[in-house]
Amino acid sequence: GEDVEQSLFLSVREGDSSVINCTYTDSSSTYLYWYKQEPGAGLQLLTYIFSNMDMKQDQRLTVLLNKKDKHLSLRIADTQTGDSAIYFCAVSYNQGGKLIFGQGTELSVKP
Amino acid sequence: GAGVSQSPSNKVTEKGKDVELRCDPISGHTALYWYRQSLGQGLEFLIYFQGNSAPDKSGLPSDRFSAERTGGSVSTLTIQRTQQEDSAVYLCASSLAKGQGAKGYTFGSGTRLTVV
């Protein structure tokens, strides 16, 4: 079946890089997404990668995809206190169109 | 509209009562999704609409939950005889096609449901 796993917490110092990891089980994924959720707010799409890509860079964000290991990561360079939020990995498939979400990783950035 | 609109933003209801949650998707978005986020949990898929039909209802947790969509636009999620475990944030999302677009889905801000 479809399952997406993330570690629950990550704490970094301001200015450091953050790496949030995600693993998934179903190899028939098409698009893989990273969403950000700030307290009391909805989900904000940060970035996405198509399953035939290995890497995508967008300003401070770098997404790495290892299809063989079914592993996705999000690197945030020069992490700021404003980056503190919950980050969700989500995977979509050809069948059904729904997104399967991980549990979310709470990123805490300390000054 | 400019974004996905959900109402009400907050709802407190007594156990056993029925509730209706509304979602107004982005104009022209044919696909609509309902998710549930319980406290400290990830997002749990509930149901997916393509137009007015629901090809995937696999996430509805029980027969107390139902949803409909009319005119290919507004959707209503109904929970009958609410229970305390139904307390959660209910999120709606819409997308242009079958959710395979490169930009993914646009989410609403959610309805926070509290069953007391």
Image (spheres, rainbow, N blue to C red):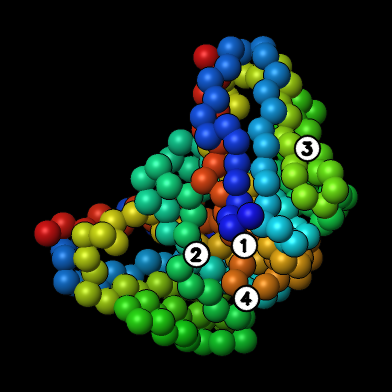
The amino acid on which the numbered mark 3 sits, given as a three-letter code, is: Ala
Q: Do the residues labelled 2 and 1 touch (CB within 8 Å)?
A: yes
**What residue is drawn where x is 72% and y is 66%?**
B96
Give the mark, 3 or 4, whose residue is nearer the N terminus: 3
Chain of the residue displaying label 2: A
Q: Which amino acid does label 4 sit on?
A: Ala
Rounded to the nearest angstrom, the CA distance separating label 3 from label 4 is: 27 Å
Q: In this view, does A12 lie above or below B13?
A: below
The correct choice, above or below, for A56 with respect to A95 in the image is below
What amino acid is labelled 2 in the image?
Answer: Leu
Tell me the residue that label 4 is attached to. B102
Q: Name the residue under label 1.
A: B105
Quarter of the image for residue B106 reads bottom right
User: Circle 2 sits on which residue?
Assistant: A45
Between the C-alphas of marks 2 and 1, the distance is 8 Å
Q: How far apart are marks 1 and 4 (CA)?
A: 9 Å
Q: Position of residue B19 (x, y in %)?
A: 67, 23
